[in-house]
Amino acid sequence: MIRLIFLLLVLGTPALAQSVMAVHAVRAGSMLGADDLAFHDADAAQGFADPRDVIGLEARVNLYPGRPILTRDVGLPTVVERNAIVPLVFERGGLSITLEGRALGRAGAGETVRVMNLSSRNTVIGVASETGQVIIR
């Protein structure tokens, strides 16, 4: 009976899985390459299991060696920087209006970002495009 309980306790513990970690310190805003990454045994439920998923992404926070890289720590490369003057494009049907706005946050292509219209001082939310424009729909 004691052996059965011991086996259940040992087999019932979760095993550590391979997780992607930084080999050296990586500053926020840096692009991640294959030479920045390594596998280690770690219990990171919100981490990456395949380094190919991380290569080409941008570090949103400072990454330290030995710590698993979590999904919230990296993102798409930034195309809209905070406080940058960006083209605001409003499209509806065949109508397209373009004006300037100031980005109130950072965003990668396809991510939402708040932008202040410089003409009216109103804040709108749009989607950053690959070209650095913010599309309002």
Image (spheres, helix red, strand yellow):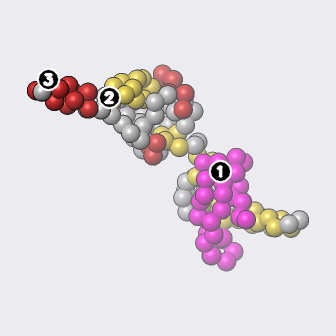
SS for callout 1: loop
SS for callout 2: loop
- Residue type for callout 2: Leu
Q: Quadrant of the N terminus?
A: top left
The front one of 42 and 78 is: 42
Q: Quadrant of the C terminus?
A: bottom right
Of the numbered discs in the image, which one, if any, rests on residue 16? 2
Q: Measure how far apart labels 2 and 1 are at the Cα level.
A: 34 Å
Where is residue 120? Give x, y as percent. 67, 77
Which range is magenta? 108-137
**Residue tagged 1:** 110
- Mark in the foreground, 2 or 1: 2
Residue at left offset 62%, top offset 66%: 125
Residue at left offset 65%, top offset 51%: 110
- Residue type for callout 1: Gly
Of the numbered discs in the image, which one, if any, rests on residue 3? 3
The front one of 32 and 111 is: 111
- Residue type for callout 3: Arg
